[in-house]
Image (cartoon, rainbow, N blue to C red):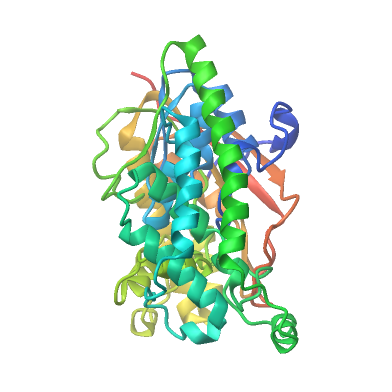
Amino acid sequence: MFMKAKQYAAKDFSFRKTCPEIPNTTYLTHKIHYYPAKFIPHIPRWFLKEYSRPNNTILDPFCGSGTALVEANLLGINALGVDINPLAHMLLQAKTELVEDHDKFSAQCLTAIDKARSHPSNYMPDLPNLDTWFLSQAREELSRIFGYLLENPDQLPEAVINFMLVCASSIVRKVCNADPQISKPFISRRMRALLKEDAVEQRALHLLERHTRTFLDRKNKYMRTVANLGKIWGYLPISKMVMDSDARTLRNISNQSIDSIITSPPYANAQEYFRSIKMELYWLNLLKDNSLKQLNREIVGTESLPLSECRDTPVFGIEDLDSALGQVHLVDQKRGHIVLRYFQDMQASIEQCYRVLKPGGYFGLLVGDNVIRKIKIDTHTFIQEIAESVDFITEDIGYDRIVARRLTPKRNASAGLIEIEWMLIFRKPGL
């Protein structure tokens, strides 16, 4: 049963000011590979300093590129991640895996680039309209790169291959005809002009070497940092993905086994995550047949709903939310049910977070409110009511202003741009 959430005086968290030890949002391995809608490292760092301690185990059920897990390891905290995106596992391994011989690892990565230069260019991804998205030189060089890495004829260690695949994935949009300044693949007017002038970057191998050297510097610095801190702690923290799991089920995670949870779930109706990185997923051979459609159907906040299921007025059970859903439904039936599905999925996830969290443990959740078809959705208030219905206790509520957006989302004029994000801090009652 849903009760009206208690109103709290919202704090201005200004997370960038709370962690002055973080030099910028892309320090160490955070810069490795683009990922849509990442949260800044200051947020998990602040939460973990406040609500966790060394040698604890934390969970991020929407871990994405692994920002929270990297920060956890830098604080001596073990971390588990869950995400349905197949790229997330590769990114986490590339960012946090420790290797014994840094120099040998770097040399093997750079050797892989030289080997790729002479590899046959016969690998082609199953990406529809490949010729539309990539010019001939870019296609050929990407084919050599990914063909060599995926076939691995020289039997390079898994850590090297995984890291190099991430480096290769990071250049895909750099040599693509889609505008790199727009999150979804889209050949903009600006890119059409560049294509007409034959000015689109195609040197995939050149960019791979440049990116690899930059990312190696960052990974080696990260590994040295953790190793030096490990000498003080007396152990090395680990990060790993929980495989075959989902934020709504948290399969393979035991009851009351997690010390704290920090996450930033997708927004309702705000990002098409898999469309944003579909080029990379295809080149990495992580998409088979109709698996892109399947992933889009499975993601929290999915827009893949059949219209036949959207006829009835959507009802969730929270009075103000149901009122907003009804208003959206009058304007756009499908959109009303997309928002309903989002809150149903979030309820399932929050219930699972309650299950796996230890008594007395803290749960930090970063969300943004939405404007959908010109109707405001107070997402953070409704999430609070859902969490309290599961028996979480609200400890604190605050906000943080979004300072910069790396990529411009192409959005409907009736969908407002999210200017602030809300941090909700919940606690599971102790024994």
Task: Give the residue drawn at x 74%, y 53%.
Answer: 404
| Residue 354 location (% of width, % of height) | 36, 36
- Kindly tell me whether residue 3 is visible in this rendering: no
Q: Compared with residue 225, is residue 200 higher up or lower down, i.e. above or below?
A: below
Q: Nearer the viewer, residue 42 or 175?
A: 175
Q: Looking at the picture, how far across and down is residue 329, in whole percent?
A: 50, 77
x 51%, y 10%: residue: 232
Quadrant in which the C terminus appears: top left
Specify the farthest residue to the front.
Answer: 118
Image coords of residue 52 (percent x, y): 49, 22
Q: Nearer the viewer, residue 290 or 132?
A: 132
Q: Residue furthest bottom?
A: 196
Q: Nearer the viewer, residue 152 or 211?
A: 152
Q: Residue at x 63, y 43 (%)?
A: 40
The percent position of residue 213, horizontal first and vertical second, equals 60, 46
**66 over 19 or under it: above or below:** below
Quadrant in which residue 203 is drawn: bottom right
Residue at 69%, 38% in the rendered image: 10
